[in-house]
Amino acid sequence: MSYGEYYNPEIETLSRSGIGALQAERLRATVRHCMNSPFYAKRFKECGLTPDDIKSPADITKIPFTTKQDLRDTYPFGIASVPLDKCVRLHSSSGTTGNPTVVLHSARDLDNWSTAVARCLWMVGCRPEDVFQNTSGYGMFTGGLGFQYGAEKLGMLTVPAGAGNTLRQIKFFTDLRTTVVHAIPSYAARIFEVMQQQGIDPRRDTALRILAIGAEPHSADTRKRIEDMLGVKAYNSFGMSEMCGPGVAFECKEQNGMHIWEDYYIVEIVDPVTLEPVPDGEVGELVLTTINREAMPLLRYRTRDLTRILPGECPCGRKHKRLDRMKGRSDDMIILRGVNIFPIQIETVLMGYEELASDYLITLETLDDNDFMTVDVELREGINVDDYNRLLKLEKDIVRRLHDEILITPKVRLVPKGSLPVSEGKAVRVKDLRKQY
Amino acid sequence: MTVHQLSIFLENRSGTLVKVLKLLKDQGIQLIASTIADTAEYGICRIICSEPVRAFDILRDAGVAVSLCEVFALELDDEPGRAADAIGIFAAEGLSIAYLYSFLLNGKGVLIFRTDNADKARDVIKRNTLSFIPEKDLSKLL
Ligand SMILES: [Zn+2]
């Protein structure tokens, strides 16, 4: 059967001016709708904002920011813009401090969310003939149900395999002829490892062709490596529970930036300190405003994710802006002896070595009242371990290149493959054992 | 002139060497000689054993970081000073040695060494008529 390239052709190929007009209209309607939210009604009153002040998308700067703390303070239902009888679903993300955050969805929200996910999956070539296996945890985590509904809406046979149980996942791949998988990158690598142990060659023994990866920062090299291992095309997915979940932004077949659906969101990149907008191409904090949401719209939500907008047009024909891969979260940032370090910087250096496998562990410790960083890196299988000098040279070289990147001299320890903790969920990348003062 | 040696990368954590030795024992592999070079963080254990290729497969399949390499094996008469003589010859010939170790097997001294210049080593051994041990003879000595 033959299909078109786009899932929502008119919207996906809408011109920039078309997107601008749509956003102006939807932003004004959203602000008007937010008057029903006790939280936003109070906010608007404080700053004297009315829906009529919104004439173009640029007027968004008149609206104050919303933060994660605002979500905690209004826990559980204080930020919603509809009464609870209009809500049909709740997702929650656990907080390490204070209240968790709660996100409410109306029936229309769920339908719109599914459409966004279906649009993403269609964009990378998923069609109703495909078999989609989701290795996300279900329940509160939005990567489970979010992909489930989207894949079903697209029309794929959708297998809610859930997280973990790698042997069963692999059995489903071969028995059900799974063609599309959603997994976090570290789990995709784990799947391959177990396949190897089982003597299964993904190219020969499975029909896998598309992998949706997200929820965990990873470098371009990691993606390439996973593609080579599994014999698939891997596409980055970006989502967050506050904005529904998956389906916010997704790579197209160009694999060069993730299109963010601008009929759903207004995207801003701001300097995390001054909160002033930065030009396209510069890294800053991602700020999102939902303009297609009923139960719980969020205005200028500070995501804490650092990224940039890729300048220029995408050859795929979609005019929706593209986000670069996430550069880490401002929350994940390690501050060591006053220097800001993102784990992805370290990962990028490590992935440049063919002698190393993909797992690593950053440990922060205090020795004699000084803070130190140790990076444990796994040697790849099959490398020559007889030559002590070569290992020593490798270690020194990694230290030097890490220093060039993060301006701190870490200690580097080579460890045998398989000796770092492997989790079926998110990989443990940072262990902070520092003395707290 | 050369024999197979297993080189195993070990974390300096108790139990890692025991695990390797047990794997070999369980499969009936006999150790002929072993040596460990270690630093604060890790060690390299080098093993000469019966059926080295099979031993390599066993360890690799068990997820051990192992390499199979060829090292030179010289036979030394069981007389004092033989090892010193051999090493003296290498030094005089300007042959750089990455590592060496020796052991006694059934009354015969065996000197194992690795160099980055294998061609030169072969040449030195031939010209100085040093006697070497073919791999098949190692197991016979057991
Ligand atoms: Zn594109």
Image (tube, rainbow, N blue to C red):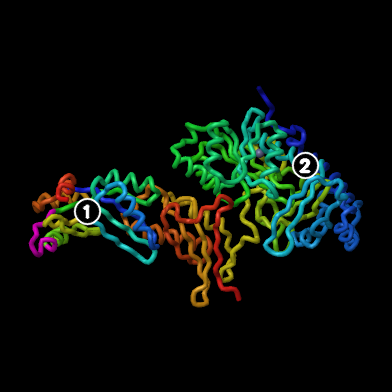
B42 with respect to A343 (left or right): left
Residue A116 makes an appearance in the image:
yes
Which SS class for mark 1? Answer: strand
Query: For the magenta stretch, what is the residue range?
Result: B75-84
Q: Within 10 angstroms of label 2, few (less than 14), some, or many (20 or more) residues?
A: many
Residue A311 makes an appearance in the image:
no
**Image vertical order of residue A398 relative to residue A208, above or below:** below
Q: Position of residue A160 (x, y in %)?
A: 64, 39
Query: Which residue is painted at 72% across and 33% down in the image?
Result: A7
Query: Which residue is painted at 44% across and 42% down in the image?
Result: A197
For disc 1, the chain is: B
Q: Amino acid at mark 2?
A: Leu
Query: Which residue is painted at 49% across and 50% down in the image?
Result: A358
CA separation in Å, label 1 and label 2: 68 Å
Q: Position of residue A224 (x, y in %)?
A: 52, 43
Does the CB distance between marks 1 and 2 fall below 8 Å?
no
The answer to whether residue B79 is magenta is yes
Q: Nearer the viewer, residue A368 or A196?
A: A196
Query: Which residue is painted at 13% across and 50% down in the image?
Result: B132
Q: Nearer the viewer, residue B32 or A215?
A: B32
Task: Name the residue beneath numbered marker 1.
Answer: B32
For disc 2, the chain is: A
Q: Within 10 angstroms of label 1, few (less than 14), some, or many (20 or more) residues?
A: some
Q: Tell me the tag on residue A110.
A: 2
A116 with respect to B16 (left or right): right
